[in-house]
Image (cartoon, rainbow, N blue to C red):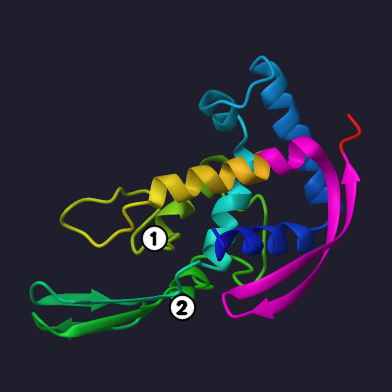
Amino acid sequence: MKLFFPNVLKWIGRAGVKLHARLAEEIRSAVRSGGGEISMAAMEKMPLMKSVVYEAFRIDPPVALQFGRAKRDLIIESHDHAFQVKEGEMLFGYQPFATKDPRIFERAEEFVGDRFVGEEGEKLLKHVLWSNGPETESPTLGNKQCAGKDFVTLVSRLFVVEFFLRYDSFEIQVGTSPLGSSVTITSLKRASF
């Protein structure tokens, strides 16, 4: 949370007032239609909010560096090449190479809040690899995907929902810290509707 929550604020803050207004409207409408309670059902009715969280994971994964030993001989393929890996060899991955691949993501270096909205957007989720595996897959004993993947996604969504229930918009100043981004909120506009 210390790594990722500042990143969420950074990217949403930089996206500006238009995105903030859309998020506030979607979140408040879904919560109202759910009887005023934040619930899993209400959050499933917030495609923009979910997309914004996935986009933050895509553009700035909380754990960018990953490694492991090959459990068997395998071939890893890129768009242009194939690489043979022998059992026991060390593998190292830098997630942003994959999550900012311009052959997969248009405007790959930009934060696009609604990138994962709609059927075509949801198809891109298999390329969101922040958890050491595709967003469309689940952690198992047989893979190295983050066991807390679903929990981290849930609390990140709750963070955004709670924030936009209280505030219409905000401005930030971004710096660096030993853990990544340092975000200072310089102005907040309280919820007006």
Please identify the quadrant where the N terminus is shown.
bottom right
Q: Is the residue marked by circle 2 packed among few (<14), some (14-19), or many (20+) residues within 10 Å?
A: few
Side of 61 relative to 42 (left or right)? left
Q: Position of residue 107 (x, y in %)?
A: 64, 68
Question: Quick check: 143 above or below 65?
Answer: above
Of discs 1 and 2, which sits in the foreground?
1
Residue linked to disc 2: 97
- On whether residue 189 falls in the magenta region, the answer is yes
Q: Tell me the residue at 67%/53% (across/down).
A: 113
- Residue 99 appears at what percent x and percent y? 48, 68
Q: Is residue 35 visible?
A: yes
Q: Amino acid at mark 2?
A: Phe
Density class for disc 1 (Cα within 10 Å; few <14, some 14-19, many ≥20) is many
Report helix, strand or loop for mark 1: loop
Q: Provide residue 20's location: percent of width, then percent of height.
A: 80, 47
Image quadrant holding the C terminus, namely: top right
What is the number of callouts on the image?
Answer: 2
Q: Is residue 169 above or below residue 79?
A: above
- SS label for mark 2: helix
Residues shaded magenta: 162-190
